[in-house]
Amino acid sequence: MTAEYIVEGRTPMVLLRVAASSRTSSLAGAIAGVIRENKYVEVQAIGAGAVNQAVKALVLATLYLKEEGINIAFKPEFADVGIEDRAVTGIKFVVEPISSSSDRSEDVEASGDEHPN
């Protein structure tokens, strides 16, 4: 796992790059730490093994943060990455805090949906 800080405007954005060999607990801790500090992180993975590690770390980070009353959501997107003069498509997960689960359950009840999108 590598971390890259990108400054766009006034708020730095943190991009965590995941490898198939990344330790899920370390990555989960990094995700949780960045969310606590910056409220936004992107997790990028190229290849099935790296995507697998990223998803497991995101689930684990969700549990870490939930203990502190912080709920997060992550949205997958395609990411075009240049590697050794060639373009490769990877997966990027945009991770942000969301309102508490009690607020979310009220939204579900109001809409009548059992499975919110």
Image: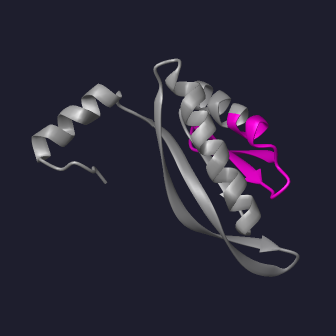
Foreground residue, 111 or 31?
Answer: 111
- Residue 79 % position (x, y): 62, 68
Instruction: Name the residue furthest front.
Output: 114
Foreground residue, 41 or 8?
Answer: 41
- Residue 109 % position (x, y): 14, 39
| Residue positioned 67% across, 52% down in the render | 54
Question: In which quadrant will I find the C terminus?
Answer: bottom left
- Residue 71 % position (x, y): 45, 31
Instruction: Name the residue furthest right.
Output: 84
| Residue positioned 76% across, 46% down in the render | 4
Q: Magenta stretch: residue 19 in it?
A: yes
Is residue 70 positioned above or below 42 on the image?
above
Foreground residue, 12 or 105?
Answer: 105
Is residue 4 positioned above or below 91 on the image?
above
- Residue 116 % position (x, y): 27, 50
Stretch of the chain drawn in magenta: 1-28
The answer to whether 18 appears left or right of 94 in the picture is right
Q: Magenta stretch: residue 45 in it?
A: no
Numbered label tally = 0
Q: Does residue 7 appear in this view? A: no
The answer to whether 31 appears left or right of 99 in the picture is right
Q: Does residue 96 appear in this view? A: yes
Colour convention of the picture: one colour
Instruction: Name the residue furthest bottom.
Output: 86
| Residue positioned 61% across, 25% down in the render | 37
| Residue positioned 80% across, 82% down in the render | 86
Foreground residue, 81 or 99?
Answer: 99
The answer to whether 5 appears left or right of 84 in the picture is left
- Quarter of the figure with residue 88: bottom right
